Amino acid sequence: MLPVRRALVSVFDKTGLEDLGSGLAKLGVEIISTGGTARQLAEGGVPVTAVSEITGHPEILHGRVKSLHPRIFGGILADRRRSEHRDELEEHEIPPIDLVAVNLYPFADAAAAPDASVDDTVEMIDIGGPSMVRAAAKNFANVAVVVDPSDYAVVLAALESEGGLSDEVRRGLALKAFRHTRSYDTAIADWLANGAAPAPDALPGTARLELERVLQPRYGENPHQAAAVYRQVGGGGVFGGFRQLQGKELSWNNLLDADAARKLSALFDGPDEDPTVVIVKHNNPCGVGRGGTLVEAYERALACDPVSAFGSIIAVNRPVDGALAEAMAKLFVEVVTAPAYEPAALERLGRKKNLRLLECPAFSPVPGQWELRAIEGGFLGQQIDAAPEDPAGWSCPTRAQPDAAQLRALDFAWKVCRATKSNAIVVTNEHQTVGIGAGQMSRVDSCRIALDKAQLDLAGTVAASDAFFPFRDGVDTLAAAGVTAIAQPGGSVRDDEIVAAADEHGIAMVLTGRRHFKH
């Protein structure tokens, strides 16, 4: 057990500082401090000794040098278990320091500021702080180090109840401290490697990820594969920080499908969008519907492919109400994800004890956000496919032009298509998917599958293709089934032939100018 008689407190983030200072003072701990921290403690009535009184030297270079001194670092680094270290402290009149409470300049925030200059950002590179943290963490056998204000209460409680800090507590605090300085140094290194002012949408030249395990599913995609779920340290958390309200533990496949469902649902989160329900199975939509109510949207989504919807993941762009809960309760569903749940919905769905209910914010991409996929020996990195789509910017080279209803249906089909595995063909009406052909090696096969899967009337429907048609056979197949308008990116050497085929069938074809492959 380590008693604490002397503490060095020097923090940029002053959260909880007065509580820490007064708590230590009540326990008779001498507090050494610097600059603004010392002033705030003194103003709060906490007795404090300035670092300059210990070092015998004033702070210099506008505060760049204040704690970098043998009388500070000797007090932190001395191993009190070694008699020669104790003798040297006594010889040089160096007071031993038992507790170091330090947090660092907010470099990452400063570097991310849009108007940050190089000189201003450099000033946020802390030198003395990380040095003290590392010194105290190295000497955790003799010193406790605190870098997180949320740990102040834990430390004070241990000192009050046990009279000191155990080996286990000090070791845990040291681990947290080294992770903290690692993240800090990584942010600085990335800033230097990627330029002082990189374009907001550029992929970095050097990338380092710090991940923290937050979940351990029973297994991965298959029972023989171990699995874990990680969040990026410093990020918003998995799914923007979700709460599981009920149900069994989440599996690897649940999370993959919930991610796909949330991202597709987010395409229908605009202020003019209707209530929308997305049903996903094996990372592909098997039904999407919208309507005046969530129940109507759900029934339309389910009608597309009620067989595949068994054991699915459902995402909703509105809080789940009691009526939707009653309708969904008739289907076996693995996961529901929504921004909120009304009490009546929780009561009804609560009877299905294994159903996993996730409450999480809507997926909202930020500029420059990118994603990684593992390949042997490395990773592929790319910007996420979050490009906005505006049907007003689409062109129509065919003689037939889409009317307002067809254009609304094409916009709906295009949104679903971009979330469907390539090669993707999605057939819809204004309100719901009618047939989905996903993940095929040839586009015409995707067309045939989408039509074969259709449970609803195909007459007057529209279709979307995630990439251009390489041959006219896909257009011929869709038109023969009753499709009256098609959205596709264009860009094929056979575009003229494809447009001519559409004209032969008297259907409208719009060119979006953007491909949405999803592998």
Image (cartoon, rainbow, N blue to C red):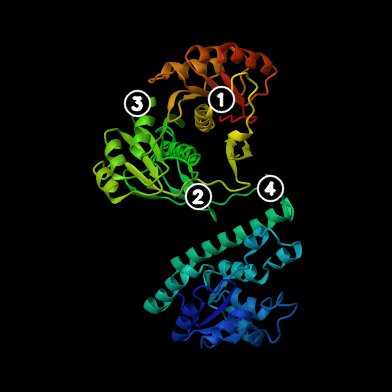
Q: Secondary structure at mark 2?
A: strand
Relative depth, front residue between 268 and 108: 268
- The residue pinned by badge 4 equals 206
- The residue pinned by badge 2 equals 231
Of labels 2 and 3, earlier in sequence is: 2
The quarter of the image holding the N terminus is: bottom left
Q: Does 391 sit above or below residue 97?
A: above
Q: Position of 285 compared to 178: left or right?
A: left
Of labels 4 and 1, earlier in sequence is: 4
Please identify, in this view, whether the residue under mark 4 or under mark 1 is nearer the observer. Answer: 1
Measuring from the top left, give residue 337's x and y in whole percent: 39, 43
Q: Does 507 sit above or below residue 282?
A: above
Structural crowding at the residue carrying mark 1, measured as other residues with C-alpha within 10 Å and reported as few (<14), some (14–19) or many (≥20): many
- Asked whether residue 279 appears in the rendered view, the answer is no
- The residue pinned by badge 3 equals 306
Measuring from the top left, give residue 438's x and y in whole percent: 49, 24
CA distance separating discs 4 and 2: 20 Å
Q: Position of 83 compared to 269: left or right?
A: right
CA distance separating discs 1 and 2: 45 Å
